[in-house]
Amino acid sequence: MSTGKLRPLVTGWHRGGLGYVAEVLRAGGIPVSTELGPDTTPAELRAKLQEKVQVTPYAVPFLDKLPADVSVTFVHRDPMRVVNSLFASGTFHGERRSPISSFVYHHLGGFKAKHSGKPAQAAVAYVNNWVRLAEGLRRLRFARVEMGASALFNAITDGYIPDFPKVSPFINSSNCPQILRPKILPQGAIQQGMMSLLWKLKYHDSVYYPQGGHAHYVNTDWHC
């Protein structure tokens, strides 16, 4: 096994378009692995980064355990799309075992007690707290799934490939109905937290021009 410099890490949210990101990197000739799961340990993460670029949401709690020279990109997707996908897939409903929810409950203190039985609120709290946790542990690059394959590849790798190969924008898409909107979320901290995140990540009409994976034009009511 190589003991040289570790490869870049790409992380983000569950249901946040990371499968699409992996295919974009592969299309650009980058060796990629998406194998790390909820049993990931810091030692395993470091070992895997010696072999390939790792694309996984399970790395977030361990970002402070990586060497300072490892490039870490948090790739994000429209947060309300992530919330709707998590809600539709039953991730936080508690009716069946979910490795995602178990991992989140373990690494976000007090999360289960506060949000159990409230799957929509849990999904909103998750997207907010996952970004907050990542930012608290590491200096990050941010990149947007919807920016298009070539631009996304450049943002993660600092590399440019003319005539970048086409990558399907529907990889791992759940095609779930978008039934949750910011205005129908519970008023108070949950709704305000989502609104703040949408503005922080610039998912509002004045700057949001999606071109790539899982990209959808939305009306003003969706974000505002």
Image (cartoon, grey):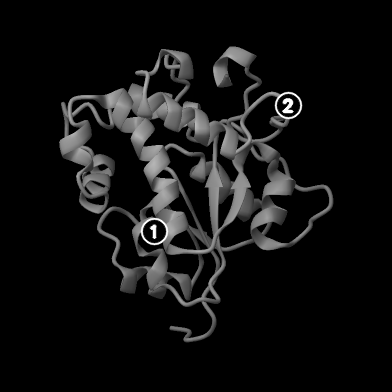
> In the picture shown, does residue 47 fall above or below 135?
below
In this view, the mark in front (2 or 1): 2
Which residue appears at 58% of the width and 13% of the height?
221
- The image quarter containing residue 212 is top right
Q: Amino acid at mark 2?
A: Ser
What crowding class fits label 1: few (fewer than 14 Cα within 10 Å), some (14-19), or many (20 or more)?
Answer: many
Side (left or right) of 52 relative to 83: right
Residue 171 spot, x, y in % from top left: 53, 35
Between 184 and 106, the one nearer to me in the picture: 184
Q: Nearer the viewer, residue 182 or 74?
A: 182
On the rendered image, what quadrant is the C terminus found in?
top right
Quarter of the N terminus within the rendering? bottom left
Q: Quadrant of residue 88?
A: top left
Asked which quadrant contains residue 60, the reply is bottom left
Q: Residue at x 29, y 31 (%)?
A: 122
Disc assigned to residue 206: 2
Q: Which residue is mark 1?
A: 59
At label 1, the amino acid type is: Ala
Secondary structure at badge 1 equals helix
The image shows a total of numbered marks equal to: 2
Between 128 and 1, the residue placed more toward the observer is: 128
Please give left or right for residue 60 compared with residue 200 in the image.
left
